[in-house]
Image: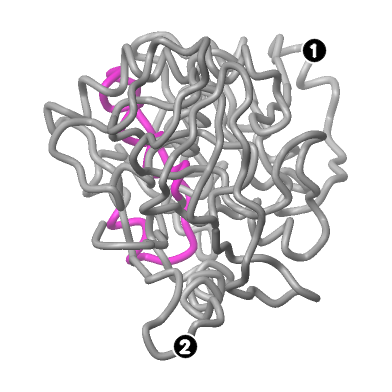
Amino acid sequence: MKAIVVDNGALQWRDAPTPTIKAGEILIRNHATAINRADLAQRAGAYPPPSGASSILGLECAGEVIAVADDVSTHRVGDRVCALLAGGGYAEVVNVPAGQALPMPRGLSFAEAAALPEVFATAYLNLFTEARLARGESVLLHAGASGVGTAGIQLCRMNASPCFVTAGSDDKVAACVALGADGGINYKTQDFVAEVKAATGGKGADVVLDMVAGEYVARELQCVADDGRIVIIAVQGGIKSEFNAGLVLRKRLTITGSTLRPRPIAFKQAIAQACLKTVWPLLESGRIKPVIHSTFPAVDATDATGSGAARAHALMESNQHIGKIVLTWSAA
């Protein structure tokens, strides 16, 4: 098979070993994958794949099942699926535990389906499992225009949970509000602490979904409600935080962290199945949707070096996108 591999930081379209199918797995002919910030970190050498996972980039894909292990009864050859991966999504063929592959929601293209698994699983896990978000509780969601952000806004709306987001431009704030956020804060020109307090009548947000960490944590303690929960899922603002522990005590706060990629297969399968039960019907009814900013061919017709993927990475690095960036291998 062919795959986009990393060579001294550059993305190259090259021959790669076709994955073999193991017990409990299916093999997928890949039609589309989506870019995640974890891909950029892995490309830079800062985020190695979990033990046993493919070293090829890519945490999600959509395609057709081409082989099924003997012990798998949930999928058949020819099924159209999208899958949550530990790696390998930038390749023509992908192997994945069967429980992490879900049927493509009816009415969606391969490109749209590829934009679902990582961000909706991440948003669902951290809002409802880690943060225990109850119906009607309020949320402060950082990076609202990101893939996880756009998924989280929609899940909050379906949960009748007021959602306030931060984003880096007025255009991004407007897009988040149009998607269903109850309020948006341009973090470059506004103070999210003051804005969240004002929007909640001084109470603060019940849940904070934090992709930034660093100095944001101290500020979040000031605008999270009593008995609130802060879930850190990325550290784009730095790994060190200094904050007033007295506020944690007085407000009875929970500060936790969460990752998805290195979790055990059984855990990821449970999250995938929870999304199938709760999120997939909303996608099929059109009540929520994948938000796609741009789609690139993985390999340009005029340049078989992986430059489509390189351009997709450059767009993510620029922070000019809203929602997901997708790579396609065929008409997706």
Which residue is drawn at the image coordinates 47% and 41% (left, top)? 148
Q: Secondary structure at mark 1?
A: helix
Q: Is residue 224 above or below residue 85?
A: above
Q: Which residue in the protein does label 1 denote?
A: 249
**Label 2 amino acid?**
Asp
Region of the chain picked out in magenta, as a range: 147-175
| Residue 210 horizontal side relative to residue 72, left or right | right
Q: Which color mode does the image show? A: one colour
The image position of residue 286, as x and y in percent, is: 13, 33
Q: Is residue 138 above or below residue 2?
A: above
Q: Which picture quadrant has residue 264?
A: top right
Q: Magenta part mainly helix, strand or loop? A: helix
Q: Quadrant of the C terminus?
A: bottom left
Question: In what quadrant of the picture does the N terminus appear?
Answer: bottom right
Do residues under tags 2 and 1 come within 8 Å of each other at their CB atoms?
no
Residue 191 image position (x, y, % from top left) = 55, 52
Q: Residue 38: x and y, percent?
A: 65, 51
Q: Which residue is mark 2?
A: 303
Mark 2 burial class by Cα count in 10 Å: few <14, some 14-19, many 20+ = few
Residue in front for this viewpoint, 74 or 211: 74
**Residue 171 belongs to magenta span:** yes
Q: Is residue 10 above or below residue 259?
A: below
The amino acid marked with disc number 1 is Leu
